[in-house]
């Protein structure tokens, strides 16, 4: 999924919060690369490279979207190699 669109109150945030492990899903399956996965925590979704970008949120307003996504990862070293990250 590249984007999820819908009217206010349609359940977009609820669905995505379930997919990324912030709230339990009541039914359905999550398939990544044609394999079913159980996601019960944000750590589970992170290991599958699934994340959520909020419409009006940035960790650091002066950085690009990609750079903010790097900063939001939980596995960062104490010093970020931006040259390597930009190549990713």
Image: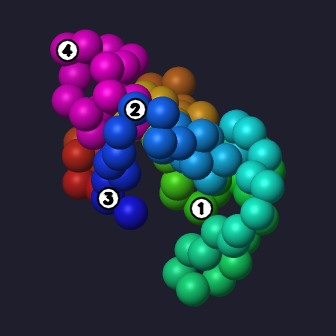
Residue at the (53%, 42%) spot, across then down: 11
Query: Where does residue 88 sit, x and y in percent of width and height?
Result: 30, 56
Q: Compare marks 3 and 1 and give the one earlier in the sequence.
A: 3
Task: Work out how far the residue at label 2 is from the one at label 1, CA to CA, in angstroms.
Answer: 28 Å
Q: Secondary structure at mark 2?
A: loop
Residue at the (75%, 52%) spot, across then down: 25
Residue sitting nearer the eye, 75 or 68: 68
Circle on res. 37? none
Residue at the (25%, 13%) spot, across then down: 61
Q: Residues within 10 Å of mark 4 (few under 14, many from 20)?
A: few
Query: Where does residue 14 sit, x and y in percent of width and height?
Result: 60, 40
Q: Do residues under tags 3 and 1 come within 8 Å of each other at their CB atoms?
A: no
Q: Is residue 51 above or below residue 28?
A: above
Q: Secondary structure at mark 3?
A: loop
Circle on res. 2? 3
Q: Is residue 58 above or below residue 85?
A: above
Q: Is residue 20 left or right of residue 23?
A: left
Q: Is residue 22 left or right of residue 70?
A: right
> What's the magenta bit mostly, secondary-structure-wise?
loop
Which of the 4 quarters of the picture holds residue 75?
A: top right
Circle on res. 62? 4
Query: In the rendered image, which residue does mark 1 sit on?
Result: 48
């Amino acid at each position: 999924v590249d984007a999820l669109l819908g009217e206010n109150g349609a359940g977009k945030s609820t669905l995505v919060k379930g997919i990324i492990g912030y709230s339990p899903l009541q039914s359905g399956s999550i398939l990544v690369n044609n394999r079913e996965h159980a996601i019960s925590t944000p750590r589970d979704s992170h290991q599958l490279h699934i994340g959520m970008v909020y419409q009006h949120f940035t960790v650091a307003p002066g950085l690009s979207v990609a750079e903010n996504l790097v900063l939001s990862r939980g596995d960062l070293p104490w010093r970020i190699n931006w040259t390597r990250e930009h190549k990713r």
